[in-house]
Amino acid sequence: MDLPCNTPGATCASGIDAATIFTRAQAAWNQRFVPPYESFTLPCASTFLADRCTGNPTVQFIVRLSDGRTYAHTIAADGSQTSVLMRGGYVYGPAGAPFGFYRRRPAPGATLPPAPPNLAADPIATIATVSVVDRAYDITLAGIETIDPHRCYHLRLRPLRDPQNYPLRDVWVDTSTYDVVRLTYVQPFNTNLATVTYDFAPVGSQNVWSIVHIDATATIHDLLATHTDHVSEDLHDIEFPASEPDDYFTP
């Protein structure tokens, strides 16, 4: 059941305000354990590589989490590697939405590395300035909702300028741990807009938080009709390899 706390500056029954929730969520995000690599599989037709696939094979992505560079290849029915589709590029989600497989957390005293060129940066980093030096969003607390098994604060974000550069619109934050459980982007898509939602959950024996589900919807208007395109897909075979060959990530 949602709580009526969707007016600016309002607090829910818990007595916490939207800005405090976001600040705690940002801290929890930055404290997450980041393994050196993450791999997962998706049907090729559900990815940005669809036009490079014959049919709809399964594609394995291996992401080097220190810089976001990615290796991708198709997988044969027997599990063997077949065609290489990407070597050292950057993975992104529907309509070009940031995928969040890049964590700009340098060693103490070091300079932040540059973001990947295709917006594959850490999603929470895109709103990191809200409570620091530059207020990019107006944040309100829409209510408390359950995303099994998490009880979550639902934050709504309204960009104060340049909506295309500030695409986050909703964030769901666990009420106990302040982990980000879900977030939503609004992205330009052809001449329209797409809504892209990522679900996060702890995965594996180390409980590494990862994107586990993607949902994207775009309403397409043409001369004769209006229709809706929808993609909904789980990430499969999520693993966290300890090492991978360096040449996988060299363009």
Image (cartoon, helix red, strand yellow):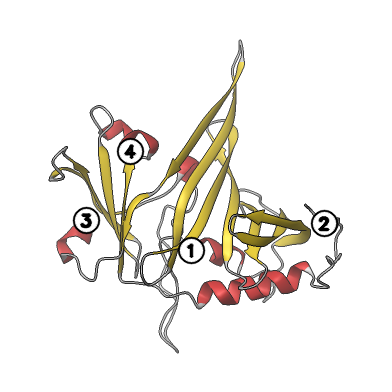
- Along the polypeptide, which appears first: circle 1 or circle 2? 2
- Along the polypeptide, which appears first: circle 2 or circle 3? 2
- Along the polypeptide, which appears first: circle 1 or circle 4? 4
Secondary element at tag 4: strand
Amino acid type, residue under disc 3 in the picture: Pro
Q: Quadrant of residue 241?
A: bottom left
Provide residue 159's location: percent of width, then percent of height.
71, 55
Q: Marks 1 and 3, how far apart in space?
A: 21 Å
Q: Is residue 230 left or right of residue 46?
A: right
Amino acid type, residue under disc 1 in the picture: Asp
Cβ atoms at labels 4 and 3 below 8 Å apart:
no
Residue 122 tag number: 1
Secondary element at tag 1: loop
Q: Marks 2 and 3, how far apart in space?
A: 49 Å
Q: Marks 1 and 2, how far apart in space?
A: 30 Å
Q: Which of these two is toward me, 141 or 160?
A: 141
Residue 43 tag number: 4
Amino acid type, residue under disc 4 in the picture: Pro
Q: Is residue 158 left or right of residue 121?
A: right
Local packing at callout 1 (Cα closer than 10 Å; few below 14, some 14-19, many 20+) is many
Compared to 235, does 9 lie above or below?
A: below
Compared to 33, does 13 lie above or below?
A: above
Local packing at callout 2 (Cα closer than 10 Å; few below 14, some 14-19, many 20+) is some
Which residue corresponds to mark 2?
A: 3
Which residue corresponds to mark 3?
A: 251
- Looking at the image, the residue that sits furthest to the front is 149
| Comparing labels 1 and 3, the label whose residue is closer to the camera | 1
Amino acid type, residue under disc 2 in the picture: Leu
Q: Marks 4 and 3, how far apart in space?
A: 23 Å
